[in-house]
Image: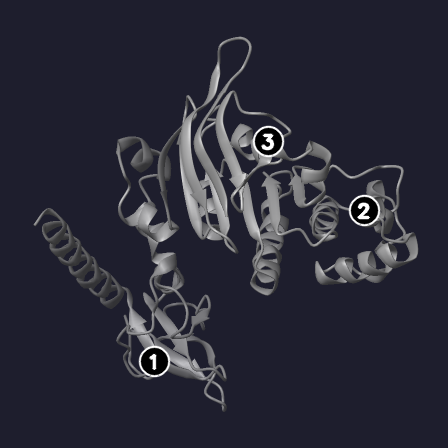
């Protein structure tokens, strides 16, 4: 557990970067610090491993103040991933990853063996281990950066905008790989980003900062979207927070119609195994039209809504675990289902509020 107890950071020019921060970051989860430029999120991150020291207040890791530990010793027990990887250009990939274990006393041979295992774990091909960073793509360099941070098996990892320097397609792949790794390793991760979508996608908890280093709200991402704490948070999360919030709503109980239902003059064509081929009409549509994808009962309402919007029939196609079509959902049904869920949530919230006041 990482605790910020009334932490203030004021720079020599009088700028207050962090203003009386009180925050408890839970173990084994991803906590994302997000906010506009100059809001103190990176300063807060760097105070954890004493790259910056607070002006006042205390930061503790597992109850021990970080100020009581030598900075070099403290950092050896904390993984650190930064934007654009920050690799040593004169060292090979495998030696970049082996750096911290060697400094901690592990033999170079064993450290390299462990480094190669980590490179495999983050999805890098074995032949890349002996290359230099300049010979890798941006996405590959970021994977090396993550592997290097994991090399000492630290209980805590700090990540400062780790995926912002790569293109959107590569970023999405890195985010998925990161979530897979966290599912296996269960580290305590604190991550900084300016991208609210990334914060919502990756964070188990999200801390929203405002200019002047003030913490405005700290909660799980679904709560952040459903119930912003104030006007600043609502504005920062964005007007489309309702659509983003569908990522946390399951399609499990969504009612479906039979696969042979005619929708807007179109009928879904299936192959011999019951898999979707596309939408067939009366010939006026110019041939078979694509389904734009399918969903399963375990998918999110965001995916179903997107498919229904993209579908030429205005209906999303549901499939079972084997990929066989087992129903259709029209966009009107999706909208009514979401309206009902929202009313239920508001009524529940009203009962909870009344109970708290009583």
Q: Residues within 10 Å of mark 1 (few under 14, many from 20)?
A: some
- Tell me which label, 2 or 1, sits earlier in the chain: 2
**Residue that carries the numbered disc 2 in the rendered image:** 104
In the picture, measured across the screen, residue 173 lies left or right of residue 345, that is: right
Disc number lying in front (2 or 3):
3
In the picture, measured across the screen, residue 114 lies left or right of residue 4, that is: right
**Residue that carries the numbered disc 3 in the rendered image:** 67
Q: Which mark is residue 327?
A: 1
**Residue nearer the viewer, 110 or 88:** 110
Disc number lying in front (2 or 1):
2
Q: Position of residue 11 (x, y in %)?
A: 54, 15
Tell me the residue at 79%/62% (across/down): 117
In the picture, measured across the screen, residue 4 lies left or right of residue 243, that is: right
Q: Secondary structure at mark 3?
A: helix
Q: Position of residue 13 (x, y in %)?
A: 53, 8
Is any part of residue 35 visible from this angle? Answer: no
Q: Position of residue 317 (x, y in %)?
A: 38, 74
Q: Position of residue 75 (x, y in %)?
A: 69, 39
Q: CA distance from mark 1 to mark 3?
A: 60 Å
Tell me the residue at 55%/35% (across/down): 45
Tell me the residue at 27%/70% (across/down): 264
Q: Secondary structure at mark 1?
A: strand
Q: CA distance from mark 2 to mark 3?
A: 21 Å
Q: Are marks 2 and 3 in contact (CB under 8 Å)?
A: no
Relative height, residue 303 to residue 225 (above, below): below
Q: Residues within 10 Å of mark 3 (few under 14, many from 20)?
A: some
- Tell me which label, 1 or 3, sits earlier in the chain: 3
């Amino acid at each position: 557990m990482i605790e910020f107890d009334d932490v203030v950071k004021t720079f020599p020019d009088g700028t207050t970067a962090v203003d009386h921060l009180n925050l408890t970051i839970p173990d084994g989860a991803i906590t994302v610090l997000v906010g506009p430029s100059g809001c103190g999120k990176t300063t807060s991150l760097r105070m954890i491993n004493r790259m910056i020291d607070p002006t006042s207040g205390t930061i503790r890791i597992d109850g021990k103040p970080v100020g009581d530990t030598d900075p070099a010793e403290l950092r050896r027990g904390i993984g650190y991933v930064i934007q654009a990887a920050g690799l040593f250009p004169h060292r090979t990939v495998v030696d970049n990853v082996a750096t911290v274990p060697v400094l901690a006393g592990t033999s170079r041979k064993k450290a390299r063996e462990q480094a190669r295992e980590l490179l495999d774990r983050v999805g890098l091909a074995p032949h890349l281990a002996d290359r230099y960073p300049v010979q890798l793509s941006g996405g590959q360099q970021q994977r090396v950066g993550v592997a290097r941070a994991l090399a000492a098996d630290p209980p805590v990892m700090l990540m400062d905008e780790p995926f912002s320097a790569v293109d959107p397609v590569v970023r999405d792949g890195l985010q998925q790989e990161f979530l897979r790794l966290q599912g296996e390793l269960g580290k305590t991760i604190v991550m900084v980003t300016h991208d609210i979508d990334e914060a919502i996608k990756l964070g188990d908890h999200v801390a929203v900062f405002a200019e002047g280093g003030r913490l405005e709200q700290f909660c799980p991402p679904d709560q952040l979207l459903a119930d912003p704490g104030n006007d600043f948070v609502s504005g920062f999360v964005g007007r489309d927070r309702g659509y983003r919030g569908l990522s946390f709503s399951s399609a499990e109980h969504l009612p479906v119609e039979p696969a042979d239902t005619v929708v807007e003059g179109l009928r879904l064509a299936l192959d011999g195994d019951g898999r979707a081929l596309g939408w067939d009409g009366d010939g006026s549509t110019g041939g078979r039209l694509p389904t734009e994808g399918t969903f399963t009962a375990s998918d999110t309402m965001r995916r179903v809504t997107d498919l229904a919007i993209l579908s030429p029939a205005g209906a999303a196609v549901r499939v079972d675990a084997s990929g066989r079509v087992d129903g259709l959902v029209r966009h009107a049904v999706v909208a009514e289902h979401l309206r009902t869920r929202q009313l239920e949530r508001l009524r529940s919230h009203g009962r909870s509020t009344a109970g708290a006041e009583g």
